[in-house]
């Protein structure tokens, strides 16, 4: 919070140059710039001389604050006098209030009111609100009551001096209700809706969105902002109380104060009453009257009125333009929450949990307002803990419309309007975090018409992704749908179909653990559904469907590729006691995955070997020679981990010959890679270098980028062991570049450890220590442990640096920041 901003009752002063765009064209850039500089000098001198504080300056406008109204009035007088003979004509507005101060400055209705008063004036005019006028001993000209585009109640406005000016730019012939709270955020959406209302070809604009997104508030504000374009009036027609669609025209006539004529059709009455007038009519909350009300709306085709409609679904009329109202963005959500919370408690303090709370509430305006109301009782941390009860926990005040008193009531309003087929699909789709149409069709029995209807009714949303169209619900709505699914008695059956679909997806797109070390798949398609797979996995464990949980072991390759090591370990800890619950094939794949996690994430070779030994027995029982070979290769890797390099050399030497004879070039490359590592670590550097060179040639020939990367790193380790720092650094850099481009953080850490070793050997201890510190920290933050033989190699060069402050500093660096420390030559 800015320490220089006065608190308590203060007076705001806003200034703005009238016709600045026109003046710029008339004066040219140079002369306008000089005039603008003089204008700023006059304003700042007057403000500073009277104790004013400059809150903000944007373009040609100023936002100033004064501790007293008298000082603000005197500053306005001096500014006006100082600019009287200038080419720039400035309008000024003053308003006094007791605003809230946040880290961003002043917030609340008083700020908006002061800005609106200033904007309604004309060049040379100083406007003063009633609250400011009451605090100064000065004769002011009474301009009467005016209502501004912030839609607050009418404000009595006064003018400093007795000069004559055109009428204020306030709302005239606008019949819109006074909202209970100021309009916050949504500037992009507001500008877009106002723009659409200005198009001659837009006569029917529907704002759609789920309950609680703030459609009505946006419509009211847009109508106020666009009111200048509708001199024949702007009118609000509330439709929520109606139950009969045939009464829509009657409600419009009532709002327009047109009496129904005996023997005359109501449509004829409206046509005659409006004549050539072109008003703007805001029809609020139409969804429950559809489709019948759509015919009523069609009657306006013969009139000149523009309709702005709010509805949870579109009207499906030919002339309709639809604008889907999104939830708030993160900044706007926090601003709204804080504003509402501080209206109840001016001393409410924001903390780190506010943004998380708003995010968990989907930044849904109604949810934020209801949550803010609960801050009188609960802290934001307590509210976060209770979000599982959000549908009933969050309640509004007595003056809130019944259908919006709780989140449950808001969503129930939409749910009750669905036909049975729509209700069933709405319930079943709650098992998905989001999904493709094909997934919704397979798991939930979706059909195009019913899915489209849920989209039209704003209970389902669509977004385009690299994986195609995805359908999803706001979390608040999904929670309600899930409740309904549980109440239907079909939850277990739908969850089972969902989990089985996830297993089939994983087996198709990720496949068995296999050659994960050199697999080049980026799993982009699978990544789109990972949230579903994670949900299915949790359900499988908690519901006793252990075989489904074991089947999902296939995603170990995805976990490794996407740096999700903690997810991998969490699966292992759940699966370890349940391996016997699967069929032999499922158990075999799960044990293979378990060994990979134990070896390459936990760096626990004994545990990995125990899993693979059990898998080896199953593979022998099944007579699956390929699985036996895969496990034997992995177990020979355990020999390398334990230091039995001779056994590894014998095994992989035989494997190279076997794969070469059978034409399995990829497996031959893998075996050459592992043979080269064993030879290298036994000190047979020339033979190791030759094996790694042959592996490199094969990987490149086969186009296996990941294999090239891993093998290049092994060649760099060999150069480090040989003492050839120049070559080692070159190879580590090559492997690092590929690792970073593929986003494989584990490999990035290994490359940086090698580079740090080269730098330490070359006397670059400070950089080496920082890089090594970042690598050590990455092991903790990412949740993996380096393979022991590799770690020992680097520790031999780097352990001595762990007492240096630079190593501690490095532990606060990301891997990207550490990579930036690598010397260019």
Image (tube, rainbow, N blue to C red):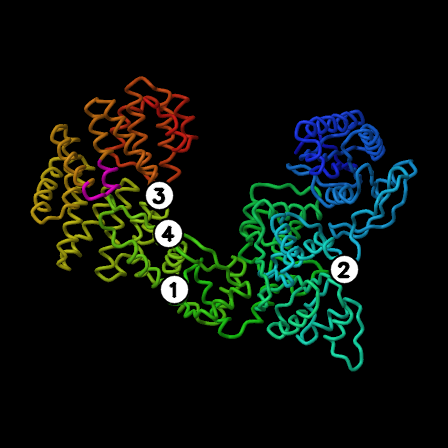
SS at badge 1: helix
How far apart marks 3 and 2 lie (CA) works out to 60 Å
As drawn, 585 above or below 131: below
Of the two numbered discs 3 and 2 on the same chain, state the one appearing first in sequence.
Answer: 2
- Give left or right: position of 699 versus 449: left
Crowding near pointer 3: few (<14 within 10 Å), some, many (20+)? Answer: some
Instruction: Identify residue for label 4.
Output: 527
Name which residue lies at 29% across and 18% down.
762
* Residue 472 % position (x, y): 47, 59
Q: Nearer the viewer, mark 3 or mark 1?
A: 1
Magenta span of residues: 701-711
Disc 4, disc 1: CB below 8 Å?
no
Q: Residue at x 34, y 22 (%)?
A: 801
Seen from this angle, which residue lies furthest front? 26
Q: What residue does disc 2 label? A: 233
The residue beneath circle 3 is 563
């Amino acid at each position: 919070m800015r320490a220089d901003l006065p608190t308590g009752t203060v007076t705001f002063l806003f200034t703005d140059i009238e016709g600045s765009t026109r003046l710029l064209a008339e004066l040219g850039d140079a002369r306008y710039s000089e005039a603008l500089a003089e204008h700023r000098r006059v304003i700042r001198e007057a403000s500073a001389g009277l104790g004013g504080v400059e809150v903000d300056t944007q373009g040609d406008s100023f936002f100033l604050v004064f501790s007293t109204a008298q000082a603000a009035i005197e500053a306005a007088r001096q500014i006006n006098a100082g600019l009287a003979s200038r080419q720039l004509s400035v309008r000024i507005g003053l308003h006094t209030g007791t605003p809230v101060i946040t880290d961003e400055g002043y917030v609340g209705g008083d700020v908006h009111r002061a800005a609106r008063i200033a904007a309604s004036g004309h060049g040379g005019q100083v406007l003063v609100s009633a609250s400011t006028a009451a605090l100064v001993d000065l004769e002011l000209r009474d301009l009467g009551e005016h209502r501004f585009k912030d839609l607050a109640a009418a404000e009595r406005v006064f003018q400093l001096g007795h000069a004559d000016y055109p009428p204020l730019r306030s709302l005239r012939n606008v019949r819109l209700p006074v909202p209970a709270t100021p309009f916050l955020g949504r500037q992009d959406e507001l500008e877009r809706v106002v723009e659409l209302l200005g198009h001659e070809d837009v006569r029917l604009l529907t704002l759609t969105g789920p309950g609680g997104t703030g459609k009505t508030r946006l419509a009211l504000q847009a109508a106020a902002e666009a009111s200048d374009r509708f001199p024949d009036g702007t009118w609000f027609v509330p439709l929520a109380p109606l139950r009969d669609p045939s009464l829509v025209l009657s409600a419009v006539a009532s709002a327009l104060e047109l009496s129904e004529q005996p023997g005359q059709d109501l449509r004829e009455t409206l046509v005659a009453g409006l004549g050539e007038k072109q008003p703007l009519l805001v029809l609020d909350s139409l969804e429950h009257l559809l489709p019948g009300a759509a015919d009523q709306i069609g009657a306006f085709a013969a009139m000149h009125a523009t309709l702005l409609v709010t509805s949870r679904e579109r009207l499906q009329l030919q002339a309709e333009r639809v604008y889907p109202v999104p939830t708030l963005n993160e900044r706007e959500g926090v601003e709204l929450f804080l504003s509402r919370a501080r209206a109840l408690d001016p001393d409410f303090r924001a903390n780190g949990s506010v943004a998380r709370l708003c995010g968990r509430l989907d930044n849904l305006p109604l949810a934020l307002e209801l949550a803010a109301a609960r801050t009188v009782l609960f802290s934001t941390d307590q509210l976060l803990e209770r979000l599982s009860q959000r549908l009933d926990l969050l309640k509004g005040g007595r003056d809130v419309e019944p259908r919006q008193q709780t989140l449950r009531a808001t969503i129930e309003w939409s749910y009750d309007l669905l036909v049975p087929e729509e209700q069933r699909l709405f319930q079943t789709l709650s098992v998905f975090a989001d999904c493709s149409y094909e997934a919704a069709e397979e798991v939930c029995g979706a059909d195009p018409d019913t899915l489209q209807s849920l989209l039209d009714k704003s209970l389902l949303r669509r977004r385009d992704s690299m994986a195609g169209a995805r359908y999803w619900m706001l979390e608040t709505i999904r929670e309600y749908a899930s409740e309904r699914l549980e109440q239907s008695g079909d939850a277990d059956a739908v969850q089972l179909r969902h989990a089985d679909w996830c297993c089939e997806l994983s087996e198709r797109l990720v496949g068995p653990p296999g050659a994960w070390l050199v697999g080049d798949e980026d799993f982009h398609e699978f990544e789109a559904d990972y949230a579903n797979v994670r949900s299915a996995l949790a359900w499988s464990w908690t519901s006793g469907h252990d075989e489904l949980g074991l089947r999902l072991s296939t995603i170990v390759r995805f976990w490794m590729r996407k740096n999700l090591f903690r997810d991998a370990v969490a699966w292992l800890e759940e699966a370890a006691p349940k391996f016997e619950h699967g069929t032999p094939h499922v158990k075999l794949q799960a044990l293979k995955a378990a060994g990979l996690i134990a070896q390459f994430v936990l760096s626990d070779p004994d545990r990995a070997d125990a899993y693979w030994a059990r898998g080896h027995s199953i593979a022998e029982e099944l007579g699956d020679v390929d699985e036996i070979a895969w496990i034997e290769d992995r177990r020979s890797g355990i020999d390398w981990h334990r230091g039995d390099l001779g056994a590894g050399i014998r095994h992989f030497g035989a494997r190279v010959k076997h794969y070469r004879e059978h034409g399995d070039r990829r497996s031959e490359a893998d075996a050459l890679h592992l043979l080269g590592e064993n030879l290298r670590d036994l000190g047979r550097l020339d033979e190791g270098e030759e094996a790694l060179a042959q592996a490199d040639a094969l990987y490149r020939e086969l186009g296996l980028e990941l294999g090239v990367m891993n093998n290049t790193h092994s060649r760099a380790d060999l150069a480090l062991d040989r003492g050839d720092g120049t070559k080692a650094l070159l190879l580590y850099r090559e492997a690092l570049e590929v690792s970073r481009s593929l986003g494989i953080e584990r490999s990035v850490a290994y490359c940086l450890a090698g580079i740090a070793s080269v730098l330490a050997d070359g006397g670059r201890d400070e950089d080496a220590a920082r890089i090594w510190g970042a690598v050590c920290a990455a092991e903790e933050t990412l949740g993996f442990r380096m393979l022991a033989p590799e770690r020992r190699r680097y520790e031999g060069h780097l352990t001595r640096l762990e007492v240096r402050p630079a190593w501690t500093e490095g532990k606060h660096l990301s891997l990207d920041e550490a990579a930036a420390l690598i010397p260019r030559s």
